[in-house]
């Protein structure tokens, strides 16, 4: 889950002001046509090429398989994958829609006890990766777990045949888990959409005789539709991306299928073919998201905070609203966190803690590396767009940032194919020309994981840096130059201080997402190397969640940081604060 | 020759020529205004002078140093210019004082600060030296931008519509203050604006630019106001009344009687432009007044409305008969106009205030 | 101090010579004002104007000879300068007692020289150079 994709710095929740790759007016331009093939453009094109290569490799292998099992896949598992994946997406889509839009409406339009806290509180489940919450609830709700045990004691049942209890390890369970941690996307974007709407329109609707509910459905909801669609697209992309939950629950989605065909059936081509089908889903989602973004009304977010009607909900209705908002937060964040805390306390073991610390350090090193590189690349691309601003560059930016939509499993396959071929190529070259075997150079190294992270998270750092750089207007550049400072001095004295906050935010966001990432890490990480996420996954799969609780808590802790930043932005947009920055 | 010289500057974006062989001079201590509609290339000219846009053809000379031509391009930071942007471009992360000292890095700290405070004093912002740009109003930001640009003692000062972001009340005051500061510092100044009033007030010389990248007319404000070279320029500087007249025996025949006309082709119909203050209203038809004053008997008119604008009034009227019958005009009269005055009203034209253009 | 640098040369001898002499005049007039030699100034200005008029005539003849397409426009421009030259003459008579007259005259002379004489002539520089090289 990428909290950062939504809020502050990166995508502005109210509008995509600096849409990816959209440059401001060129500064200090040089017009001749042949100039565009220069350092900046070259760098951007190379970066875009790198980002495209894994995906291209997957598609290529899918169409030119070495060991073609496609007919076999079609006749056996494909239909299952499709229906399961669709069911999952449908379920999560509906669930997040109801919870996300519903709570957003309550929080923005009504007044009830605790509203102020819920404004940012609703975001907390974002800190919780889906796989962790899946592990926790399985532990609690399974047959051998505390809840069923308590029920059996309470009602005197002795075995499975005595009562019915929903099976958590099912498609339904997966839907529930993902809904709980993904609804904040829809919440955030719906909230922003509601806030943007002219209160005048809504009040006009009411003055014309339509009560609050009808006004909601006929005026407010349709206007908020683009924002909601964007939120849903992001939710569904994350649903497709999920591996930990579906793996644990044995829910046969494409993600799981890819792993299965690859690692169990040992057939990369088959995995690539499944991945290509998945890309079709992704393409559809991306299309919807882009379409919805275009239809959004772009508001100047520095406009004054509008006084909202705040329908007061009193008595039972008020309590009902509070409960409706409290429940998702409780189930999606508070309860799992408490359980993990409990486990961490119960299973505390100094040796284990030392091991966890080792994994934590791995995680941190890897995430910091990826974060720093992602930001450096983003800065290069952002500056190219600023200085050159050609259509070629804008398209290249868009391509380079595509990775956010591609599921981790697909990227992992792609990276492996690319690096594998690269290594084999270098090896055979060395053998024919130098008589020695170089073996595997890139595959199975930190480079591989980092590559995967960069492709997936570049969009995040690029969006954040671009918004920061956009605050440095071309006339500021001109002013600095006219006051005697050359290009580098201007970068040092004007740009750097002004984009510092965005750069740090970008590093932070990529860092957090890398810490939480699972599918790519599991496949691409080097032998004898584990991150916190893969460690938790391994132990949970072995029914030892308790031992891994500390690691899980660390991940959640890290995930809370962007939520805090987001909620600060939300707090800032209330009256009495300086708006628009 | 001190000041800015643009010589035969030509500029095109793609295949569209934006500046067409433009030459002019801004002497040291003088303020020249480039006046024209948006898109006419005036900002491009400014940016070329500053070095922010690469010169395509011609040359740019500042204080006898060729800063740009076919072989040379001196970058902006070496041209010793001051530039004021439309959005002021103050650095948000620096205080007012730090903004103003930004260009003074070649001096030692103490002298830099002194000079900065001196400039801030000149613009009346010394009290706000520790504040940050976002705490200031538009007018205050403009003044800081002015101080910042002038602090390094540039030899050329360029302004890009610096007052358009201010509300009208502020504008005239800030304009006057800016002009005073510029004159005090005696630096060659080139200003770009689309507001004719602004150009008239501030400039020693105005260059009216047309949409095709040519200079339509250049001259002192009075020259352009009283002798516009064509209708477009005439219209720029205020509302004009228009009517047609026939040229007969060296005179213009219209509803207003016969008006002396020079340099008009006999027998043609011409379009006559006259400013609101070039006409007068009276209760007499003047045909038997003494020799002084406007010629012609004037036209009988019906008053449509009168708007008091302060110390003058704008009166709208319609001519009754003659070849301009039915046409509506507006005239500016001193003081207030009494609508309840009964009796016929005549409107007369002052021949010194008319502009003639052939009816093409 | 005004000076003709290579950028301002029209590359036609007669015209450039006239320009140089006009520049000299301008410098002398400016110096006279600065040194408070008002009588000298009042003497110089009419000569300056006279030279300008002769220069215009020479220029028009040259342009006519080569059939410069914009010649009417240029003639009109010269004709329009009559008023300015009148103004300068009037101001020259007033420099003694009036500071504003001095400043205005200085400015008018310089602008007249640069914009109305030299910069205007840039318009036909290319044409004349081409025409004369074809002649050779």
Image (cartoon, coloured by chain):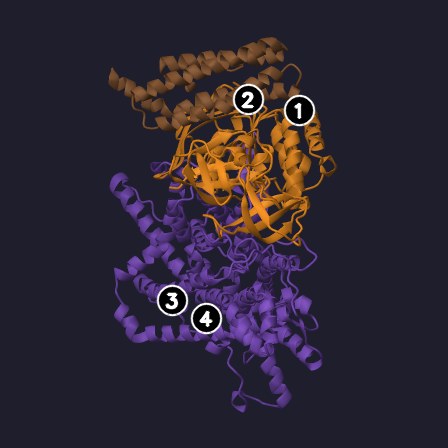
- Residue drawn at x 64%, y 24% as measured from the top left: B107
Query: Could you tell whether A467 is left or right of C14 in the image?
Result: right
Provide the letter of the chain coloured orange: B
Chain letter for mark 1 = B
Real-space CA distance between mark 2 and mark 3, rounded to the nearest whole angstrom: 81 Å
Asked if the residues shown at circle 1 and circle 3 are in contact, with their CB atoms under 8 angstroms apart, the answer is no
Which residue does the numbered mark 2 point to in the structure image?
C87
The residue that label 1 is drawn on is B108
Measure how far apart labels 4 and 3 are at the Cα level.
18 Å
Helix, strand or loop at disc 3?
Answer: helix
Q: Nearer the viewer, residue B97 or A246?
A: B97
Disc 3 residue crowd, few under 14, some 14–19, many 20+, Cα 10 Å: some
Q: Residues within 10 Å of mark 1 (few under 14, many from 20)?
A: few
State the image coordinates of residue A155 (x, y, percent, origin top left).
62, 90
Residue A281's disc is 3
Rendering colour (chain C): brown
Helix or strand or loop: what does disc 4 sit on?
helix
């Amino acid at each position: 889950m990428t909290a950062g994709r939504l809020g502050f710095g990166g995508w502005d929740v109210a509008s995509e002001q600096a849409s990816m790759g959209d440059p401001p007016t060129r500064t200090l331009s040089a017009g001749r046509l042949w100039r565009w093939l220069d350092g900046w453009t070259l760098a951007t094109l190379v970066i875009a090429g790198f980002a495209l290569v894994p995906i291209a490799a997957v598609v290529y292998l899918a169409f030119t398989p070495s060991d073609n099992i496609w007919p076999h896949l079609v006749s056996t598992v494909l239909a299952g994958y499709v229906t399961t994946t669709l069911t999952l997406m449908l379920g999560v889509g509906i669930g997040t829609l109801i919870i996300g839009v519903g709570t957003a409406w309550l929080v923005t339009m009504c007044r009830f006890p605790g509203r102020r806290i819920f404004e940012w509180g609703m975001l907390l489940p974002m800190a919780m990766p889906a796989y962790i919450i899946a592990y926790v609830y399985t532990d609690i709700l399974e047959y051998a777990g505390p809840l069923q045990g308590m029920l059996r004691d309470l009602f005197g049942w002795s075995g499975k045949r005595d009562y019915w209890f929903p099976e958590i390890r099912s498609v339904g369970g997966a839907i529930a888990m993902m809904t709980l941690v993904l609804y904040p996307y829809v919440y955030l974007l719906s909230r922003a959409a509601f806030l943007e709407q002219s209160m005048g329109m809504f009040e006009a609707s009411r003055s014309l005789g339509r009560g609050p509910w009808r006004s909601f459905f006929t005026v407010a909801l349709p206007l908020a539709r683009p924002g909601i669609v964007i939120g849903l697209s992001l939710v569904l992309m994350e649903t497709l991306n999920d591996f930990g939950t579906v793996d644990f629950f044995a829910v046969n989605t494409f993600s799981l299928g890819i792993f299965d065909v690859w690692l169990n059936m040992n057939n990369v081509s088959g995995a690539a073919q499944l991945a290509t089908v998945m890309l079709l889903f992704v393409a559809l989602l991306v299309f919807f998201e882009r379409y919805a973004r275009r239809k959004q009304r772009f508001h100047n977010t520095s406009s004054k905070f509008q006084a909202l009607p705040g329908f007061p909900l009193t008595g039972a209705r008020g309590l009902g609203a509070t409960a409706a908002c409290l429940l998702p937060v409780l189930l999606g964040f508070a309860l799992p966190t408490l359980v993990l805390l409990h486990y961490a306390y119960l299973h505390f073991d100094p040796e284990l803690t030392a091991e966890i610390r080792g994994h934590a350090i791995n995680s941190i090193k890897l995430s910091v590396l990826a974060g720093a590189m992602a930001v450096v690349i983003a800065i290069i691309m952002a500056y190219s767009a600023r200085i050159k601003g050609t259509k070629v560059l804008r398209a290249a930016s868009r391509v380079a940032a595509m990775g956010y939509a591609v599921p981790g499993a697909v990227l992992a396959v792609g990276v492996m194919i690319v690096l594998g071929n690269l290594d084999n190529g270098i090896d055979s070259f060395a053998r024919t020309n130098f008589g020695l075997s170089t073996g595997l150079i890139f595959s199975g190294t930190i480079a591989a994981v980092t590559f995967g992270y960069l492709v997936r998270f570049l969009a995040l750092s690029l969006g954040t840096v671009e918004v920061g750089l956009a605050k440095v207007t071309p006339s500021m550049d001109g002013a600095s130059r006219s006051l005697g400072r050359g290009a580098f001095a201007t970068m040092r004295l004007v740009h750097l201080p002004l984009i510092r906050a965005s750069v740090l935010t970008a590093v932070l966001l990529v860092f957090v997402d890398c810490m939480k990432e699972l599918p790519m890490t599991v496949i691409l990480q080097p032998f004898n190397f584990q991150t916190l996420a893969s460690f938790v996954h391994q132990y949970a799969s072995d029914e030892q969640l308790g031992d891994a609780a500390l690691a899980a808590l660390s991940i959640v802790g890290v995930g809370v940081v962007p939520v805090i930043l987001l909620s600060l932005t939300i707090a800032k947009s209330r009256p009495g604060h300086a708006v628009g920055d | 020759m001190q000041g800015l010289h643009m010589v035969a500057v030509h500029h095109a974006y793609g295949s569209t020529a934006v500046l067409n062989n433009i030459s002019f001079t801004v002497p040291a201590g003088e303020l020249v205004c480039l006046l024209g509609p948006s898109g006419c290339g005036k900002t491009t000219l400014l940016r070329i002078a500053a070095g922010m846009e690469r010169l395509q053809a011609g040359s740019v000379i500042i204080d006898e140093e060729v800063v740009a031509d076919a072989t040379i391009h001196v970058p902006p930071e070496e041209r010793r210019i001051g530039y004021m942007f439309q959005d002021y471009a103050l650095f948000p992360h620096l205080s007012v004082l730090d903004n103003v000292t930004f260009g003074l890095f070649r001096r030692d700290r103490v002298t830099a600060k002194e000079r900065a405070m001196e400039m801030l004093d000149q613009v009346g912002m010394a009290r706000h030296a520790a504040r940050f740009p976002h705490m200031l109003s538009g007018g205050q930001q403009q003044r800081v931008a002015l101080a910042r640009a002038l602090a390094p003692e540039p030899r050329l000062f360029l302004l890009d519509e610096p007052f358009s972001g201010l509300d009208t009340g502020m504008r005239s005051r800030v304009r006057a203050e800016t002009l005073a500061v510029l004159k005090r510092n005696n630096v060659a100044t080139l200003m770009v604006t689309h507001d004719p009033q602004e150009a008239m007030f501030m400039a020693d010389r105005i260059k009216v630019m047309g949409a095709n990248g040519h200079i339509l007319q250049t001259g002192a404000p009075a020259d352009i106001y009283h002798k516009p070279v064509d209708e477009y320029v005439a219209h720029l500087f205020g509302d004009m009344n228009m009517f047609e007249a026939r040229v007969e025996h060296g005179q213009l025949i219209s509803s207003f009687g016969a008006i002396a006309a020079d340099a008009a082709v006999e027998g043609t119909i011409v379009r006559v432009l006259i400013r609101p203050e070039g006409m007068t209203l009276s209760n007499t038809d003047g045909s038997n007044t003494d020799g002084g004053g406007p010629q012609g008997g004037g036209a009988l008119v019906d008053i449509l409305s009168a708007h008091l604008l302060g110390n003058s009034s704008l009166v709208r009227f319609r001519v009754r008969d003659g070849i301009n019958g039915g046409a509506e005009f507006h005239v500016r009269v001193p003081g207030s106009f009494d609508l309840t005055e009964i009796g016929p009203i005549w409107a007369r034209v002052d021949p010194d205030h008319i502009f003639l253009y052939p009816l093409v | 101090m005004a000076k003709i640098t290579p950028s301002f040369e029209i590359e036609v001898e007669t015209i450039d010579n006239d320009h140089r002499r006009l520049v000299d005049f301008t410098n002398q007039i400016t110096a006279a004002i600065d040194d408070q030699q008002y009588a000298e100034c009042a003497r110089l200005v009419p000569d300056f104007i006279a030279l300008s008029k002769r220069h215009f005539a020479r220029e028009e003849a040259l342009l006519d000879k080569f059939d410069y397409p914009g010649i009417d426009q240029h003639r009109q421009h010269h004709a329009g300068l009559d008023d300015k030259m009148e103004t300068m003459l009037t101001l020259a008579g007033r420099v003694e007692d009036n500071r504003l007259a001095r400043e205005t005259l200085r400015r008018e002379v310089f602008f007249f020289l640069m914009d109305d004489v030299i910069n205007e002539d840039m318009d036909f520089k290319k044409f004349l150079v081409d025409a004369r090289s074809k002649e050779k």
